[in-house]
Image: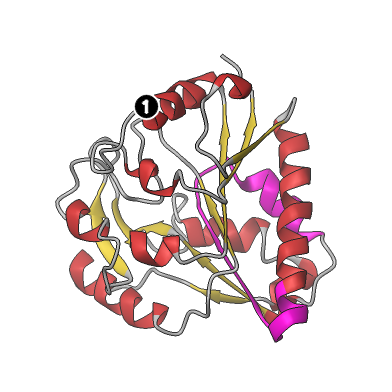
Amino acid sequence: MAISDLKLPQGVSAHAFKSPVLLAESLALNVAKKLSDAIEARGTATLVVSGGRSPVAFFQHLAKQTLDWSNVVISLADERWVPVEHADSNAGLIKRYLLQGPAAKAQFLNLYSASANLEQAAEQADRLLSELPVIDVLILGMGDDGHTASLFPNSPNLDEALKVDGTRRCWPMLAPTVPHQRLTMSRALLASAKHKILSISGSSKLTTLSFALAGDDVTEMPVRAFLQPTLEIYWCP
């Protein structure tokens, strides 16, 4: 299957690349341009990214872009509830690969807090995100189960987190197949981003995306909530 074989909704665009490096380079240039335009328009820019191992090359290329980084705010679409020093921390990943060199001047809003429990951590992150400016660029990934951010199928809070008009910004989440508890931005907050990009790689992700496009139950495959006009999809084998 090729990405050109997918029946994408009107207004959704797809970009295919021959390698992860080429995808990362192109994505970094695109994001830097959008952030630069936002800074020029209103003085600040906000970027929300996803964690995991896939974005590392993108982070490294983005960190090299010429930007007024001191006027950029960066946050995470989701986070594992582990300290920044933990190997699985998305915040730690951001600090190692994106907040380097001139990019270290960016303001980083970290969702993690050493609270007594996950619910309290989510409440604290929710308060923190009240300070988040309008999201200019959102980078999402997708799991083979159709989750995006940490909006996992069958997670206890999923229905609330997927409300189109929800007012809560951050929710505690449980990932069914992985050990760490999660914090995730709500659908409403993520959907408010001006520019939304889904970055995926591998043939299995194309198969998952094909299934997602064939239905409309967002609780079954939460990525469906974002397969809307203006979404850009970046894919490589």
Horizontal side of residue 201 vs 160, given as left or right: right
Q: With respect to residue 226, does 94 lie above or below?
A: below
Q: At 45% across and 43% down in the image, what residue appears?
A: 227
| Residue situated furthest front in the rendering | 10
The residue nearer to you, when weighing 192 against 23, is 192
Name the secondary structure under disc 1.
loop
The residue nearer to you, when weighing 128 against 227, is 227
Locate the N terminus and report the quarter of the image it occupies: top right
Locate the C terminus and report the quarter of the image it occupies: top right
| Residue situated furthest top in the rendering | 1
- Which class describes the residues within 10 Å of circle 1: few (<14), some (14-19), or many (20+)? few
Q: With respect to residue 124, does 64 lie above or below?
A: above
Horizontal side of residue 43 vs 159, given as left or right: right
Q: Give the range drawn in magenta.
A: 38-64
- Whether residue 1 is visible, yes or no, is yes
Q: With respect to residue 35, does 218 lie above or below?
A: above
Horizontal side of residue 210 vs 6, given as left or right: left
Residue 65 percent across, percent down from the top left: 82, 61
Residue 92 percent across, percent down from the top left: 53, 60
Q: Is residue 79 magenta?
A: no
The residue nearer to you, when weighing 68 against 113, is 68
- Whether residue 81 is visible, yes or no, is no
Q: In which quarter of the image is residue 57?
A: top right
Q: Which amino acid does label 1 sit on?
A: Ala
Residue 63 percent across, percent down from the top left: 75, 60
Q: Is residue 51 magenta?
A: yes
Residue 99 percent across, percent down from the top left: 67, 66
Q: At 75% across and 36% down in the image, what residue appears?
A: 21
Name the residue tied to disc 1.
214
| Residue situated furthest left in the rendering | 156
